[in-house]
Amino acid sequence: MTTLNKDIAQFYDSSSQLWEQVWGEHMHHGYYGRGGNHKLNRRQAQINLIEELLSFSNTTSASHILDVGCGIGGSTLYLAEKFNATAKGITLSPVQAARAAQRANLVFLQDQVSFEVADALNMPFPDNSYDLVWSLESGEHMADKTRFLQECYRVLKPGGTLIFATWCHRPTNSLAGELTPDEKRHLEEIYRVYYLPYVISLPEYEAIAHHCGFKNIIADDWSTAVAPFWDIVIESAFDPKVITGLLNSGWTTIQGALALGLMSRGYERGLVRFGVLSGTKKNLN
C-alpha cells in the first residue's frame, strides 16, 4: 500500500465512527435544489443527491453494482435495496469495510451486498463485471485520475454505466485563466487536511473519460446545489457531543473539523467545484 493510501485509510479509520454519529450513514454532500435554496434536513438532502445522480445519468435499473470508495456503505445499501441488486463496496479503510458489513446485516442485505478493502487503482475484479460503477466523492483521493477511470471502464460490462461525482477545482480554460498562487495555496491546505493528492477540473475529467473510451458522456457542475452542505456541517460541529467525540478521535479528525471552513470558503470564491459525470461502456455489438 502506498504512503498516501495508508494515510487515507488511517484518516477514515479514525474519523468514520464520529462522522456516522454526527451525519448518519451517508458521508457525502447533500443536494439542495439546483439553486441550492431548498430547506432540507441533511439526510434527506444526501438521499436527494443519490436520486439526482440516478436521474442525471438516466439510470433506472442495475443488477450488479460496484461502489468505489463506499465509506460505511450508505450508497451501496441504498442502491442495492432500490434496484434489488447485488452490490460490492470497496474502501481503503478496514474500519469502514467492517462497519459497512455490520450495517448490511442490520438491514438484512448481507446476502446481496459485500464490502472489502481494495485499491481503486488496482481493483481485484475481472473485466466486464458490473453494469453500474458508482463513485461518490472518492475521485479526489485518487493519485492517478486516468488510471482510476481506466479501472472503472475495465470492470464495467459492455453497455454499463459509470456515475461519478467528485471535488474539482474551477476550469482553467475560461477567461479566469490558470489558478492563481493564492488559489493554489487554498487547495494545498485542503489537500493536506483531507489527504488528497490533487484535484483537477471537470473539463479535464471529461477529456480523460473520452480517452478511456466512455461513450454518451454527460457532465455538469453542481456546486451551487451542494454548497449549503458545508455550512450545515460546520453548525453540527458545535454540538457538545460532537466536540467530545472530536477530542476523543485524534488529531487527524480534529484537523479535518477545523478545516471545514476551507471548503465553505472554496465554494464561495468559486474555486472548489462539485463535478458530476456519467458515461457508458461501448456495447460489443
Image: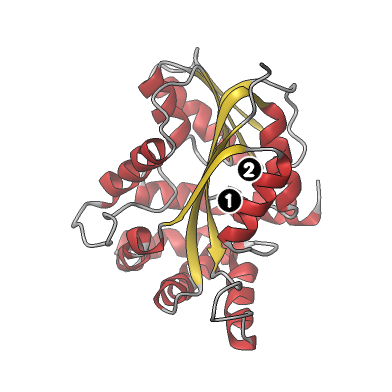
Q: Is residue 135 at least partly visible in the picture?
A: no
- Secondary element at tag 2: loop
Packing grade of label 1 (10 A; few <14, some 14-19, many >=20) is many
Q: Nearer the viewer, residue 6 or 66?
A: 66
- Secondary element at tag 1: helix
Q: Position of residue 240 (x, y in %)?
A: 31, 64
- Which numbered marker is on residue 93? 2
- Looking at the image, residue 81 lies above or below residue 177: above
Q: What residue is rendered at 72% in x and 37% in y?
A: 151
Distance, label 2 to label 1, CA atoms, is 6 Å
Q: Image quarter for residue 186? A: bottom right
Badges 2 and 1: C-beta atoms under 8 Å apart? Answer: yes
Which residue sits furthest top?
111
Residue wearing tag 1: 12
Q: Nearer the viewer, residue 53 or 68?
A: 53
Which residue sits furthest front?
285
Packing grade of label 2 (10 A; few <14, some 14-19, many >=20) is many
Q: Nearer the viewer, residue 139 or 22?
A: 139
Q: Position of residue 196 (x, y in %)?
A: 65, 61
Q: What residue is rendered at 58% in x and 23% in y?
A: 159
